[in-house]
Image (cartoon, rainbow, N blue to C red):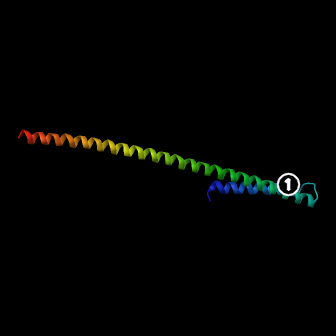
């Protein structure tokens, strides 16, 4: 656990402790105070779950987008590779034909 995570956990813990103490010393009877604490805890829990779900969805979306971009890049690299191979093959065939013609010309002239 890194320093930022520990700080966040400590801050949330202190916040919850402060809220609980504030509610306990509030001028309400014990039953109402416990009910209020329970409701606030449930609300906070729902908020945390919602935020965690949002973060998870965002990370998943970014991961999927990255995969799509990598697939596109791989396709472009593949196209470029085959284009260069075909170009090199064509040039090699041209050079081979020229060498063949020069050799035949040299043999015929000899």
In this orientation, which residue lies closer to the viewer: 109 or 46? Answer: 109
In this rendering, would 52 be left or right of 102? right
Task: State the residue at coordinates (84%, 59%).
Answer: 38
In this rendering, would 76 be left or right of 31? left
Residue 68 in percent (x, y) is at 54, 47
Task: State the residue at coordinates (75%, 57%).
Answer: 13
Residue 93 in percent (x, y) is at 25, 43
How many numbered discs sit on the rendered protein? Answer: 1
Residue 53 in percent (x, y) is at 69, 53
Task: State the residue at coordinates (70%, 57%).
Answer: 9
- Which residue is identified by label 1? 22
In this orientation, which residue lies closer to the viewer: 31 or 104? Answer: 104
Residue 101 in percent (x, y) is at 16, 40
Query: Which residue extends farthest front?
Result: 108
In this orientation, which residue lies closer to the viewer: 101 or 16? Answer: 101
The answer to which image quadrant residue 44 occupies is bottom right
Q: Quadrant of the C terminus?
A: top left
The answer to which image quadrant residue 82 occupies is top left
Q: Is residue 91 above or below residue 18?
A: above
Task: State the residue at coordinates (76%, 52%).
Answer: 47
In this rendering, would 19 be left or right of 108? right
Under tag 1, what secondary structure? helix
Crowding at dot 1, Cα within 10 Å, few <14 / some 14-19 / many 20+, comes out as few
Q: Quadrant of the N terminus?
A: bottom right
């Amino acid at each position: 656990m890194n320093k930022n995570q520990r700080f966040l956990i400590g801050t949330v813990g202190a916040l919850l402790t402060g809220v609980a103490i504030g509610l306990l010393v509030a001028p309400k009877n014990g039953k109402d105070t416990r009910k209020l604490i329970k409701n606030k805890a449930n609300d906070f829990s729902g908020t945390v779950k919602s935020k965690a779900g949002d973060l998870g969805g965002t990370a998943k979306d970014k991961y999927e987008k990255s995969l799509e971009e990598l697939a596109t890049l791989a396709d472009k690299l593949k196209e470029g590779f085959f284009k260069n191979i075909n170009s090199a093959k064509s040039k090699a065939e041209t050079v081979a034909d020229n060498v063949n013609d020069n050799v035949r010309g040299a043999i015929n002239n000899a």
